[in-house]
Image (cartoon, rainbow, N blue to C red):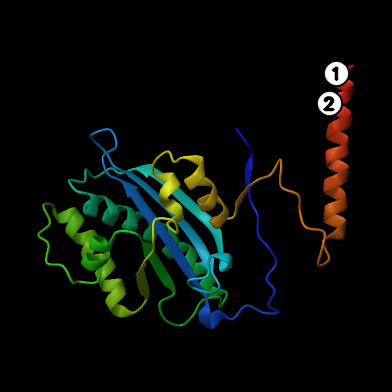
Amino acid sequence: KPDLGLEYHRSSKAEVDPTTSCITIFSDSSFAPRGRESQTGAIVCWTSEVGNPNAQFTIAWLSTKQRLLAESSCEAELIACNEGFRVGRNIGSIFDELSLLRPTHKVDLAVDNKSTIQVIQGASNLVWRTRHISIKAHRLSQEVSRGTVGIRHVGTKEEIADYLTKPLPISSLDPLLKLSNLVCVTDSKPSTTSGDHKHGEKWKDKQANQTEMKLDTCD
């Protein structure tokens, strides 16, 4: 298995504009993959420009089985969205204290299920089978109506939490890993531009030492 690590690139801007920055929560689910519990996947990013994949930086993630049994994909997506929101809300409070978030819609929910979005926005009159799911739906709807939370639809190719819910082919997995700032640290060579020359030299020395150790082992 390759060793993966988070890689962040230095922004080309002199300063980050907090009026356009927010916490983006990507959430997804796999509905009852084994006939029982659904799987939740969520990734929390700090986004300096909404809609720009190169301006989002992964800071937390979640992959877990749902404790509450969902009877539809919409219910599973709603549970996943709620679980991701709980993680992102706490992180958002820290960024807000540092004045790194815009004044409204400080948290942005990125969901690939349109039915879930309609439920959260209050455009759907679904009758929930349990009180627990109803509370989760109304809780998110309340946050959206207050203007503290925004919600938007993202396509499957942009839903980076997808690989936390189920196995994906390499052709689909690699682009999502790049969008979530994950790279193979054993193959990734750091940039030597923009004042990173010393860091690049340290990387070269480390690679040389590893090569020497391999040769010594062979002897």
Residue nearest the observer in this picture, 175 or 199:
175
Residue 8: horizontal and vertical position, in percent?
65, 59
Q: Circle 2 — which element?
A: helix
Residue to which mark 2 is pinned:
214
Q: Amino acid at mark 1?
A: Cys
Q: Is residue 48 left or right of residue 145?
A: right
The 10 Å Cα crowd at callout 2, few under 14, some 14 to 19, many 20 or more, is few
Percent position (x, y) of residue 206?
84, 41
Left or right: where 15 falls relative to 156: right
> Residue at coordinates 71% horizontally, 79% vertically from top-left?
14
Which quarter of the picture shows residue 131?
bottom left
The residue at the point 24 percent across, 71 percent down is: 121
Q: Residue at x 48, y 71 (%)?
A: 51
x and y, in percent, of residue 84 in the image: 39, 56
Q: Which one is in front, 207 or 107?
A: 207
Type of the residue with mark 2: Lys
**Looking at the image, is 35 positioned above or below residue 121?**
above
Where is the C terminus found, in terms of image quarters?
top right
Most extreme residue toward the front, as rendered? 171
Q: How many marks?
A: 2
Please name the residue shown 25% across and 61% down the image: 116
- Residue 150 coordinates in the image, percent (x, y): 36, 73
Q: From the viewer's perspective, is 65 left or right of 208? A: left
Label placed on residue 40: none
Give the number of the disc on residue 218. 1
Q: Where is residue 136, by image quadrant?
A: bottom left
Identify the secondary structure beneath mark 1.
helix
The quadrant the N terminus occupies is top right
| Label 1 Cα neighbours within 10 Å, binned few <14 / some 14-19 / many ≥20 | few
Badge 2 vs badge 1, beta-carbon distance below 8 Å: yes
Where is 83 relative to 194, above or below? above
Q: Is residue 190 above or below residue 90?
A: above
